[in-house]
Amino acid sequence: EPEVTQTPSHQVTQMGQEVILRCVPISNHLYFYWYRQILGQKVEFLVSFYNNEISEKSEIFDDQFSVERPDGSNFTLKIRSTKLEDSAMYFCASSGGLWDGYTFGSGTRLTVV
Amino acid sequence: AQSVTQLDSQVPVFEEAPVELRCNYSSSVSVYLFWYVQYPNQGLQLLLKYLSGSTLVKGINGFEAEFNKSQTSFHLRKPSVHISDTAEYFCAVSDRGNAGKSTFGDGTTLTVKP
């Protein structure tokens, strides 16, 4: 069964450093998403991406965040200057149609120290 | 804007017993509804979805859910659970006018005991 692959599984970074979280969505999917889950809290929407541009972004997704689909297969989330409160599990998801439901990756646990 | 309330944070149940995980939603527009399951150290996996048509939807692993528009609910059920069903379950809602964005509930931890 096709999978969404996320790397790395765990990343530790110092406050103020830039991080790039990587995702390889399912190859024939058209819609891509990033969600995050702070420990013990809800799964929160960050951003949706379609046709090489952002479709929607949440209030969390401020100027420190950016997404890119650089080569037609990878989908990346960049945090320019990490803060302690960015520590969370970040999930990439993709879907073939708007209402198909998501296929999630296993997540990247980001720890900012 | 929509919101999702999962009424039980933890549900312990014995193996082979039936289970219901409750989900209520709030939205000013028509919605699509989803249930996801998250096993330890894994991503979320789609269990089932309601888009339109029959209000009773069947998903993977023997789960089903019933959409009740008047009660704005989408409760998840399984007639007989297994130890392997132990996981976190998330209800999610998307409004029909939005580009696939989902709002998730807090999750319900289902623990199946032998």
Image: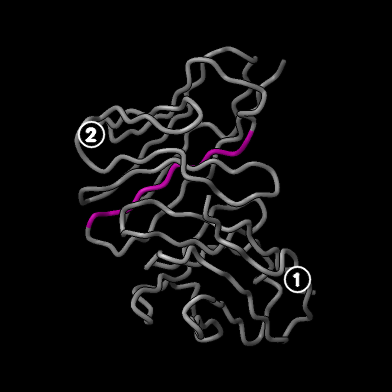
Provide the residue designation for mark 2.
B69
Residue B102: give x, y in percent of width and height: 39, 56
Q: Nearer the viewer, mark 1 or mark 2?
A: 1
Q: Which residue is mark 1?
A: A11
- B42, B107: nearer the viewer: B42
The residue depicted at 43 percent of the width and 29 percent of the height is B76
Q: Please report, as a chain letter, where disc 2 is located.
A: B
Image coordinates of residue B96 in percent, x first then y, are: 23, 55
Instruction: Quadrant for the C terminus of chain A, please.
Output: bottom right
Q: Is residue A32 left or right of residue B2?
A: right
Asked if the magenta segment contains residue A94, the reply would be no
Number of marks: 2
In three-dimensional space, the C-alpha distance between marks 1 and 2, rounded to whole angstroms, equals 43 Å
Amino acid of disc 2? Lys
**Same chain assignment for discs 1 and 2:** no
Residue B97 pos. (x, y %): 22, 60
Lateral position of residue A109 relative to residue B77, left or right: right
Q: Is residue B88 magenta?
A: yes
Of all chains, the one bearing label 1 is: A
* Depth check, front residue: B23 or A1: A1
In this rendering, is residue A88 above or below A40?
below
Task: Indicate how the structure is coloured in the image.
Answer: one colour
Q: Residue at x 75, y 73 (%)?
A: A112
Residue range highlighted in magenta: B87-96
Magenta: predominant secondary structure element?
Answer: strand
Residue A35's disc is none
- Tell me the residue at 67%/64% (across/down): A108
Q: Secondary structure at mark 2?
A: loop
Q: Amino acid at mark 1?
A: Gln
